Image (tube, grey):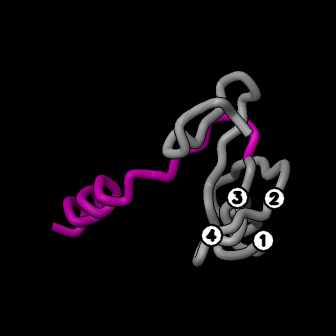
Amino acid sequence: MPNNPNWLRYDPDEDKSRHGAADPDCCEEMEEKYGWKLIEIEKIDGPILKVDCVFQGKTEFPDWYKELESKEDEDA
């Protein structure tokens, strides 16, 4: 585990990102949807999020709000 605060989910030393998920299938869905490379699934002890999906490199979710605004501008 990286020597970073828990909220910092990217480890620059290992060049890995972690995203919590309810189950391993969600990790595979993220990999497919966002084109990230899934390298490991770690079990965690959370009440809802049961696994950490570990991806190669720095990964960030798209800014859905900007995408929504852009779509609204196209429809206007």
The residue identified by callout 1 is 24
Q: CA distance from mark 1 to mark 3?
A: 8 Å
Amino acid tagged 3: Asp
Which of discs 4 and 1 lies nearer the camera? The answer is 4
- Pick whichever, 40 or 72, lies toward us: 40
Q: Sort mark 4 into few (<14), some (14-19) or many (20+) by Cα contacts within 10 Å.
A: few
Q: CA distance from mark 2 to mark 1?
A: 7 Å
Q: Is residue 48 above or below residue 56?
A: below
Tell me, for residue 13, which label it has, or none. Answer: none
What's the magenta region?
Answer: 55-76
Local SS, label 1: helix
Task: Point out residue 76 in the picture as x, y percentages from the top left corner.
Answer: 15, 67
Q: Is residue 46 above or below residue 55?
A: below
Q: Is residue 71 above or below residue 47?
A: above
Tell me, for residue 41, which label it has, or none. Answer: 2
Q: Sort mark 2 into few (<14), some (14-19) or many (20+) by Cα contacts within 10 Å.
A: some
Local SS, label 3: strand
Q: CA distance from mark 4 to mark 3?
A: 10 Å
Task: Point out residue 10 in the picture as x, y percentages from the top left corner.
Answer: 61, 36
Looking at the image, the residue that sits furthest to the top is 13
Residue drawn 70% across the image and 49% down it = 36
Dot placed on the residue nearer the N-terminal end, 2 or 1? 1
The residue identified by callout 4 is 46
Query: CB atoms at circles 2 and 1 under 8 Å apart?
Result: yes
The residue identified by callout 3 is 52
The stretch drawn in magenta includes residue 56 = yes
Query: CB atoms at circles 3 and 2 under 8 Å apart?
Result: yes
